[in-house]
Image (spheres, rainbow, N blue to C red):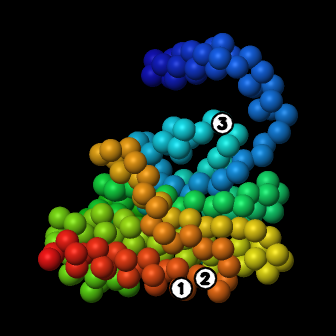
Amino acid sequence: MPLDDLLAGNRAWAADVVQRDPGFFRRLESLQSPRYLWIGCSDSRVPANEITGTDPGDVFVHRNVANVVVHTDLNCLSVLQYAIEVLGVEEVVVCGHLGCGGVVSALDGKRLGLIDNWLRHVQDVAHEHARLLDSAREEDRPDLLCRLNVVEQVTNVCRTTVVQEAWSGGSRVNVHGLVYGLGDGVLRDLAVSTASVAEVDVRREAAVARLAAGLTSTST
């Protein structure tokens, strides 16, 4: 049975962890104190702990198709609120990945079923930046939209009541945007990190301008 493979893999992993660090699981069950909240894509090729070299307990994770942050998504907002207000997380990371199927489908307008309603949010990003996307070569548009989507989702995180109230209350919360390359396994910083209300629009505009400048330098 396929489930047997998962169970066998789990036991092998647990045994290996105990062999390397006999007290690991005892420490883990006594306290959850992650440093990061990771908002990433559901894609099976982008597991947060593995690609960041972190251990269980280091990263609090929320994932959905195309790493979208929607102000009516109580699942995502609850994770965000719990991470910041209960766990005391100060670093929030939105991570997209190049070659994202959700982004490609949103860009192409390919009908996939119920998920089309969710990908409408990514299509909204494409509509917002239509001129910039049109100026890119066709083969570069999916990766450009992936990056633009991360920038916009970082902005969405910053505009949630959870983060706004944390900042107004004097809490330290930094929101970052990264893109992961499936082809090389490397995370790239989009330099959209935001730490206050005053920075939200400034960081967003600067990040979009850098992406636009990158197109210009590529075409010359």
Q: Decide: marks 2, 1 in contact (CB < 8 A)?
A: yes
Residue drawn at the location 28% of the way across and 74% of the way down: 214
Q: Alpha-carbon distance for marks 2 and 1?
A: 5 Å
Looking at the rendered image, the quarter that the C terminus falls into is: bottom left
Residue drawn at the location 75% of the way across and 68% of the way down: 172
Q: Position of residue 32 (x, y in %)?
A: 78, 42
Q: Position of residue 100 (x, y in %)?
A: 35, 56
- The residue carrying pointer 3 sits among few (fewer than 14), some (14 to 19) or many (20 or more) residues within 10 Å by Cα, namely few
The numbered mark, 3 or 2, whose residue comes first in the sequence reads: 3
Q: Quadrant of residue 209?
A: bottom left
Going by the numbered disc 2, the residue's amino acid type is Glu
Instruction: Classify mark 3: helix, strand or loop.
Output: loop
- The residue carrying pointer 1 sits among few (fewer than 14), some (14 to 19) or many (20 or more) residues within 10 Å by Cα, namely few
Q: Between 195 and 144, which is closer to the camera in this rendering?
A: 195
Report the residue marked by disc 2.
199
Residue drawn at the location 77% of the way across and 46% of the way down: 33
Q: Position of residue 91 (x, y in %)?
A: 66, 60
Going by the numbered disc 3, the residue's amino acid type is Pro
Residue 175 got which mark? none
Q: Is residue 86 above or below residue 72?
A: above
Report the residue marked by disc 1.
202
Q: Alpha-carbon distance for marks 3 and 1?
A: 34 Å
Report the residue marked by disc 3.
56
Q: Position of residue 44 (x, y in %)?
A: 43, 42
Instruction: Classify mark 1: helix, strand or loop.
Output: helix
